[in-house]
Image: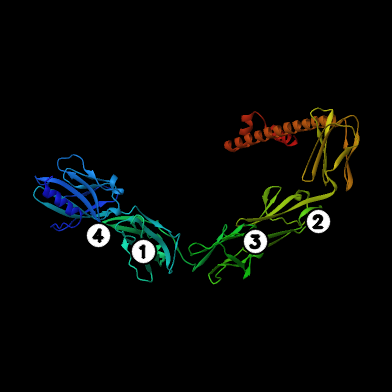
Amino acid sequence: MNPTALVALLLWTSGTFLTVTGKAQSVSAWYGDTIVVPCPGGNPPPEDLMFVKWKIDRSDGTAVDLLVKQHRSSQATIQATDGYAQRVGIDDRQSLLISKASLRDQHTYTCMVVTESNLNEYSVAVRVHKKPSSVEILDESEALTKDKLTQVGTCVAAEANPAAAITWRKDGQPLEADGEGVVIASSTKLDPTTGLSTTSSSLQFSATKADAHSVFTCVSTYEGSSQEVHMDPLPVHYPSEKASLEIVSQQPIEEGDNVTLRCQADGNPPPSSYFFYFQDKKLPEQSSDTYSIPSISREASGEYKCSLPENKEVQASKRIYVNYLDLVLRPSGRLVKTVGHLLTVKVEKNSTSDALVSWTKDGRMVEEPAFSSLTYGDAGVYTCQASMGRLTRSQSLELVVEGSPVITSLTKHQANDPKHQVLVCEAEGFPEPTFKWSISYTNEKSSYANGKAVHNVTVVLQANLTIFCNVSNKLGEVFSTISIHPDIQKRSGEKEDEVAVVVAVAVAVALLLVVTVGIVCWFWRRKSRSGSFRTHAAHTGHTAEETKQLAGNSENV
């Protein structure tokens, strides 16, 4: 080394050598990256360069040598003994390289360039920048309260250098603190170990109902760039101002229906419970927002209310009308009456509106019954049904008409052969009567309907007999007689022959009379045309006397 350069180096390292430098440069680097500190100002090294040396100028006035590199050597000599020993280096342009930049590297670095003819030094200030490692919103509120300052959340931009700035937006519009509806509190905390800054900003907001769907956004701004964090829309809580009462049931409400009252209010969140009242009397609590009335009765008609437990002034009311239908049939059930008696049937209705009444007898539609004189045909099951909307009521009368037997007819007629005759005995009565005959019989047939009984038997014609038909039930007994004759068929045949003979004789006489009258008329006409009876007689071949005699004979016929 040139002796002059050696003396200059010794003086510079001792801090007593005064050099002339230009204005100090500055460079910036990102946290964790490699810092490149240029020397001299990034210009190519001079041709007569001998060596380059780098040192740190600390804020306390001390200096620390980092490295020195001879111009003709490929390797630098590391002089640092602290944490820089493993992190410093030099490139081909004589720039200082510091890896894994941190805030501790924010110093002024001095580069000494020694040539064969001169010694120069250049100072470079290093600034290390770090973006926030994270931007997040902490302590997010679950809901806002109407017209009341409520904590929205705290936005935190962590570990930055320099510190990040935080602002708030609502639905994309900036929020400005006014101390009333919007309160923003910001703070910055410096980590003494890392030297990094964490910025926090808390937002309090007084909401309205319209803010229920608003989106709050935290904006972190650093070195001209920004990062946004959006919150989910927050519900806005507010007390109830109005209530409504709903009646859940089929309409119109009829006795026996299941009815549910449901109360609602316009608060948010909705009230968790309500009080229910009937005719201003508090009802037992059932569930959160409903009150059930199973199988409602007419006595439950009236005014119902619901209110908030914490504010009875917020209430709603509804009136319930319960339709009902009563039906009474007099008499009803099973009724036994005597045939021929009078029976009066009455229907009594009690309903909230007109009801339609219909009657059936044994399942068939009939008119309303009226019994002035009961007959066996009146017996049966009568059902009276009243209908009103969905309501139906019915009452039944089982009418039994009873009486002792009465024989209405006892007849006979010829069977299919002349040796037998059929006897028919008809009677009325209830209970069903039984038949007994005073003669043996075959081919018995019987029927019974509506109090009328018919009994047919076939008997053999053996002798003249008077036969008894006996009819009885538990209420009485009656009989009637009929006579039969074995020769009834023979005498009937003879009489028919006699009648036939008489008829034949009558017919013959009538024919003879007609012929005689015809002949007389013919002669009379003949005489009229000829002008004399004689002419007629000559024409016929009879004298006047003969003709007169013929006329007399015809009159005697």
Q: Quadrant of the C terminus?
A: top right
Which mark, by number, is residue 284?
Answer: none
Q: Are marks 4 and 2 in contact (CB under 8 Å)?
A: no
Q: Which residue is mark 2?
A: 341
Give the image quarter of residue 425. Answer: top right
Which mark, by number, is residue 61?
Answer: 4
Q: Are marks 3 and 4 in contact (CB under 8 Å)?
A: no
550 displayed left or right of 140: right
**Percent of width and height locating residue 520:** 66, 35
Q: CA distance from mark 1 to mark 4?
A: 33 Å
Which amino acid, by three-letter code, is at mark 2? His
Choose between 275 and 369: the one closer to the eye.
275
How many numbered discs? Answer: 4
- Name the N-terminal-most of marks 3 and 4: 4
Tell me the element at label 3: loop
Question: Callout 1 environment at 10 Å: few (<14), some (14 to 19), or many (20+)?
Answer: few
393 displayed left or right of 47: right
**Percent of width and height locating residue 379:** 76, 49
Tell me the element at label 2: loop
Which amino acid, by three-letter code, is at mark 3? Tyr
From the viewer's perspective, is the residue at label 1 or at label 2 nearer?
1
From the viewer's perspective, is the residue at label 3 or at label 4 nearer?
4
**Percent of width and height locating residue 378:** 75, 50
